[in-house]
Image (cartoon, rainbow, N blue to C red):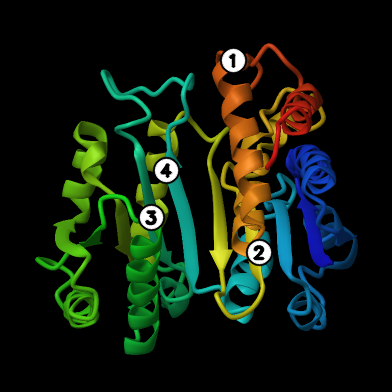
Amino acid sequence: MYRIAVIPGDGIGPEVIAEGLKVLEAVSDKVGFKYETVTYDFGGERYKRTGETLPDSATAELSEFDAIYLGAVGHPDVEPGILEKGILLRLRFELDQYINLRPVKLYPGVTTPLRDKGPDDIDFVVVRENTEGLYAGTGGFLRKGRSDEVAIQTSVNTRKGVERCIRYAFEYCRKRNKQKKLTLCGKTNVLTYAFDLWERVFHEVGAEYPDIEREYAHVDAICMWMVKNPERFDVVVTDNMFGDIITDLGAIIQGGMGIAAGGNINPDGVSMFEPIGGSAPKYAGKGVINPMAAISACQMMLDVLGETQAAEILEAAIIKVVSTKLKDMAAGRMGYSTSEVGDLVAEAVSGQDIC
């Protein structure tokens, strides 16, 4: 019996999470595992009512679940940063979800803006450090609001944080067992302190993994190669800020935000899974948003929970639907409503033979 905390959140979050839960029910019926969900109303509407992003008891309570399934955070009536920092970043930090895991995988039938590239070329994973770097919030203002104002934001990189992220990436690369190549993405020629640490730890830990090829590339080169030669990548490991940037690029080359999902991973605790496209409030309530990213996040959740067969069945269902039914992954041009896409995936799950 898995206990799953559900945070539908803001904007389109409730709509896409509803389809993910629909598909979760279908795959649980197919495979036979049990689960229960508890829904939390954390988000913009609650903040508007109470002035509270998360109650003090929230992280302790959520830590008792097996997984967290998040829809979206971001409300047009709430100043940017309040919900993102108060809910999303706080959960990542307090639950020590120190890995952000982002598969970049082009499915058959999905259109990529990259000419002459197909599913065999776009299939890699970004392992992003998730609790340090510029996102740690270290810094402040001097003489704020004046003409001589100074704003400082410091990137925090600890040996512990860097090493556990890099070690996770090596283990993941070994388990993935494809090219068996790990690329460190950094900027050693300019950020000479932070990425000196990253590069030293990368090679020190890498010596324990002689079966994994190691390479280093500057972040600007990574962005160029993701467009020009995405097939060169297997697993990429990087810091918080660079990871945030290159995974959005990854989402576009795999077909857009409508398919992109991510996991905030604590290998020894509770992990949180989400579509990465945001709350898109202008589309909320219209039933036109593709829920496939939320469904893919559910597939990631099952895989991390150890329900390998269920994850494989769900991924096969996703591939079937996107390759045969969804001709355009962009919002409003799918040919199906949000709920109809969920129905299609649930039907594809139910129709599969299992051994």
Tell me: 202 left or right of 339: left
- Please provide percent x and percent y for residue 233: 26, 47
Near-viewer residue (46 or 344): 344
Q: Residue at x 69, y 34 (%)?
A: 291
Circles 2 and 3: CB atoms closer than 8 Å: no
Whole-angstrom CA distance, mark 4 to mark 1, is 20 Å
Callout 2 secondary element: helix
Q: Residue at x 38, y 29 (%)?
A: 119
Question: Disc 1 marks which residue?
Answer: 324
Q: Residue at x 60, y 62 (%)?
A: 304
| Residue type, label 4 | Val
Circles 4 and 3: CB atoms closer than 8 Å: yes
Question: Disc 2 marks which residue?
Answer: 305
Whole-angstrom CA distance, mark 1 to mark 3, is 28 Å
Whole-angstrom CA distance, mark 4 to mark 3, is 7 Å
Question: Disc 4 marks which residue?
Answer: 104
- Please provide percent x and percent y for residue 258: 58, 32
Near-viewer residue (95 or 177): 177
Q: Is residue 254 visible?
A: yes
Q: Earlier in the sequence, mark 2 or mark 3?
A: 3
Callout 3 secondary element: strand
| Residue type, label 2 | Leu
Nearer the observer, disc 2 or disc 3? 2
10 Å crowding of disc 1: few (<14), some (14-19), many (20+):
few
Question: Disc 3 marks which residue?
Answer: 126
Nearer the observer, disc 2 or disc 4? 2
- In the rendered view, tell whether residue 324 sits above or below residue 20: above
| Residue type, label 1 | Thr
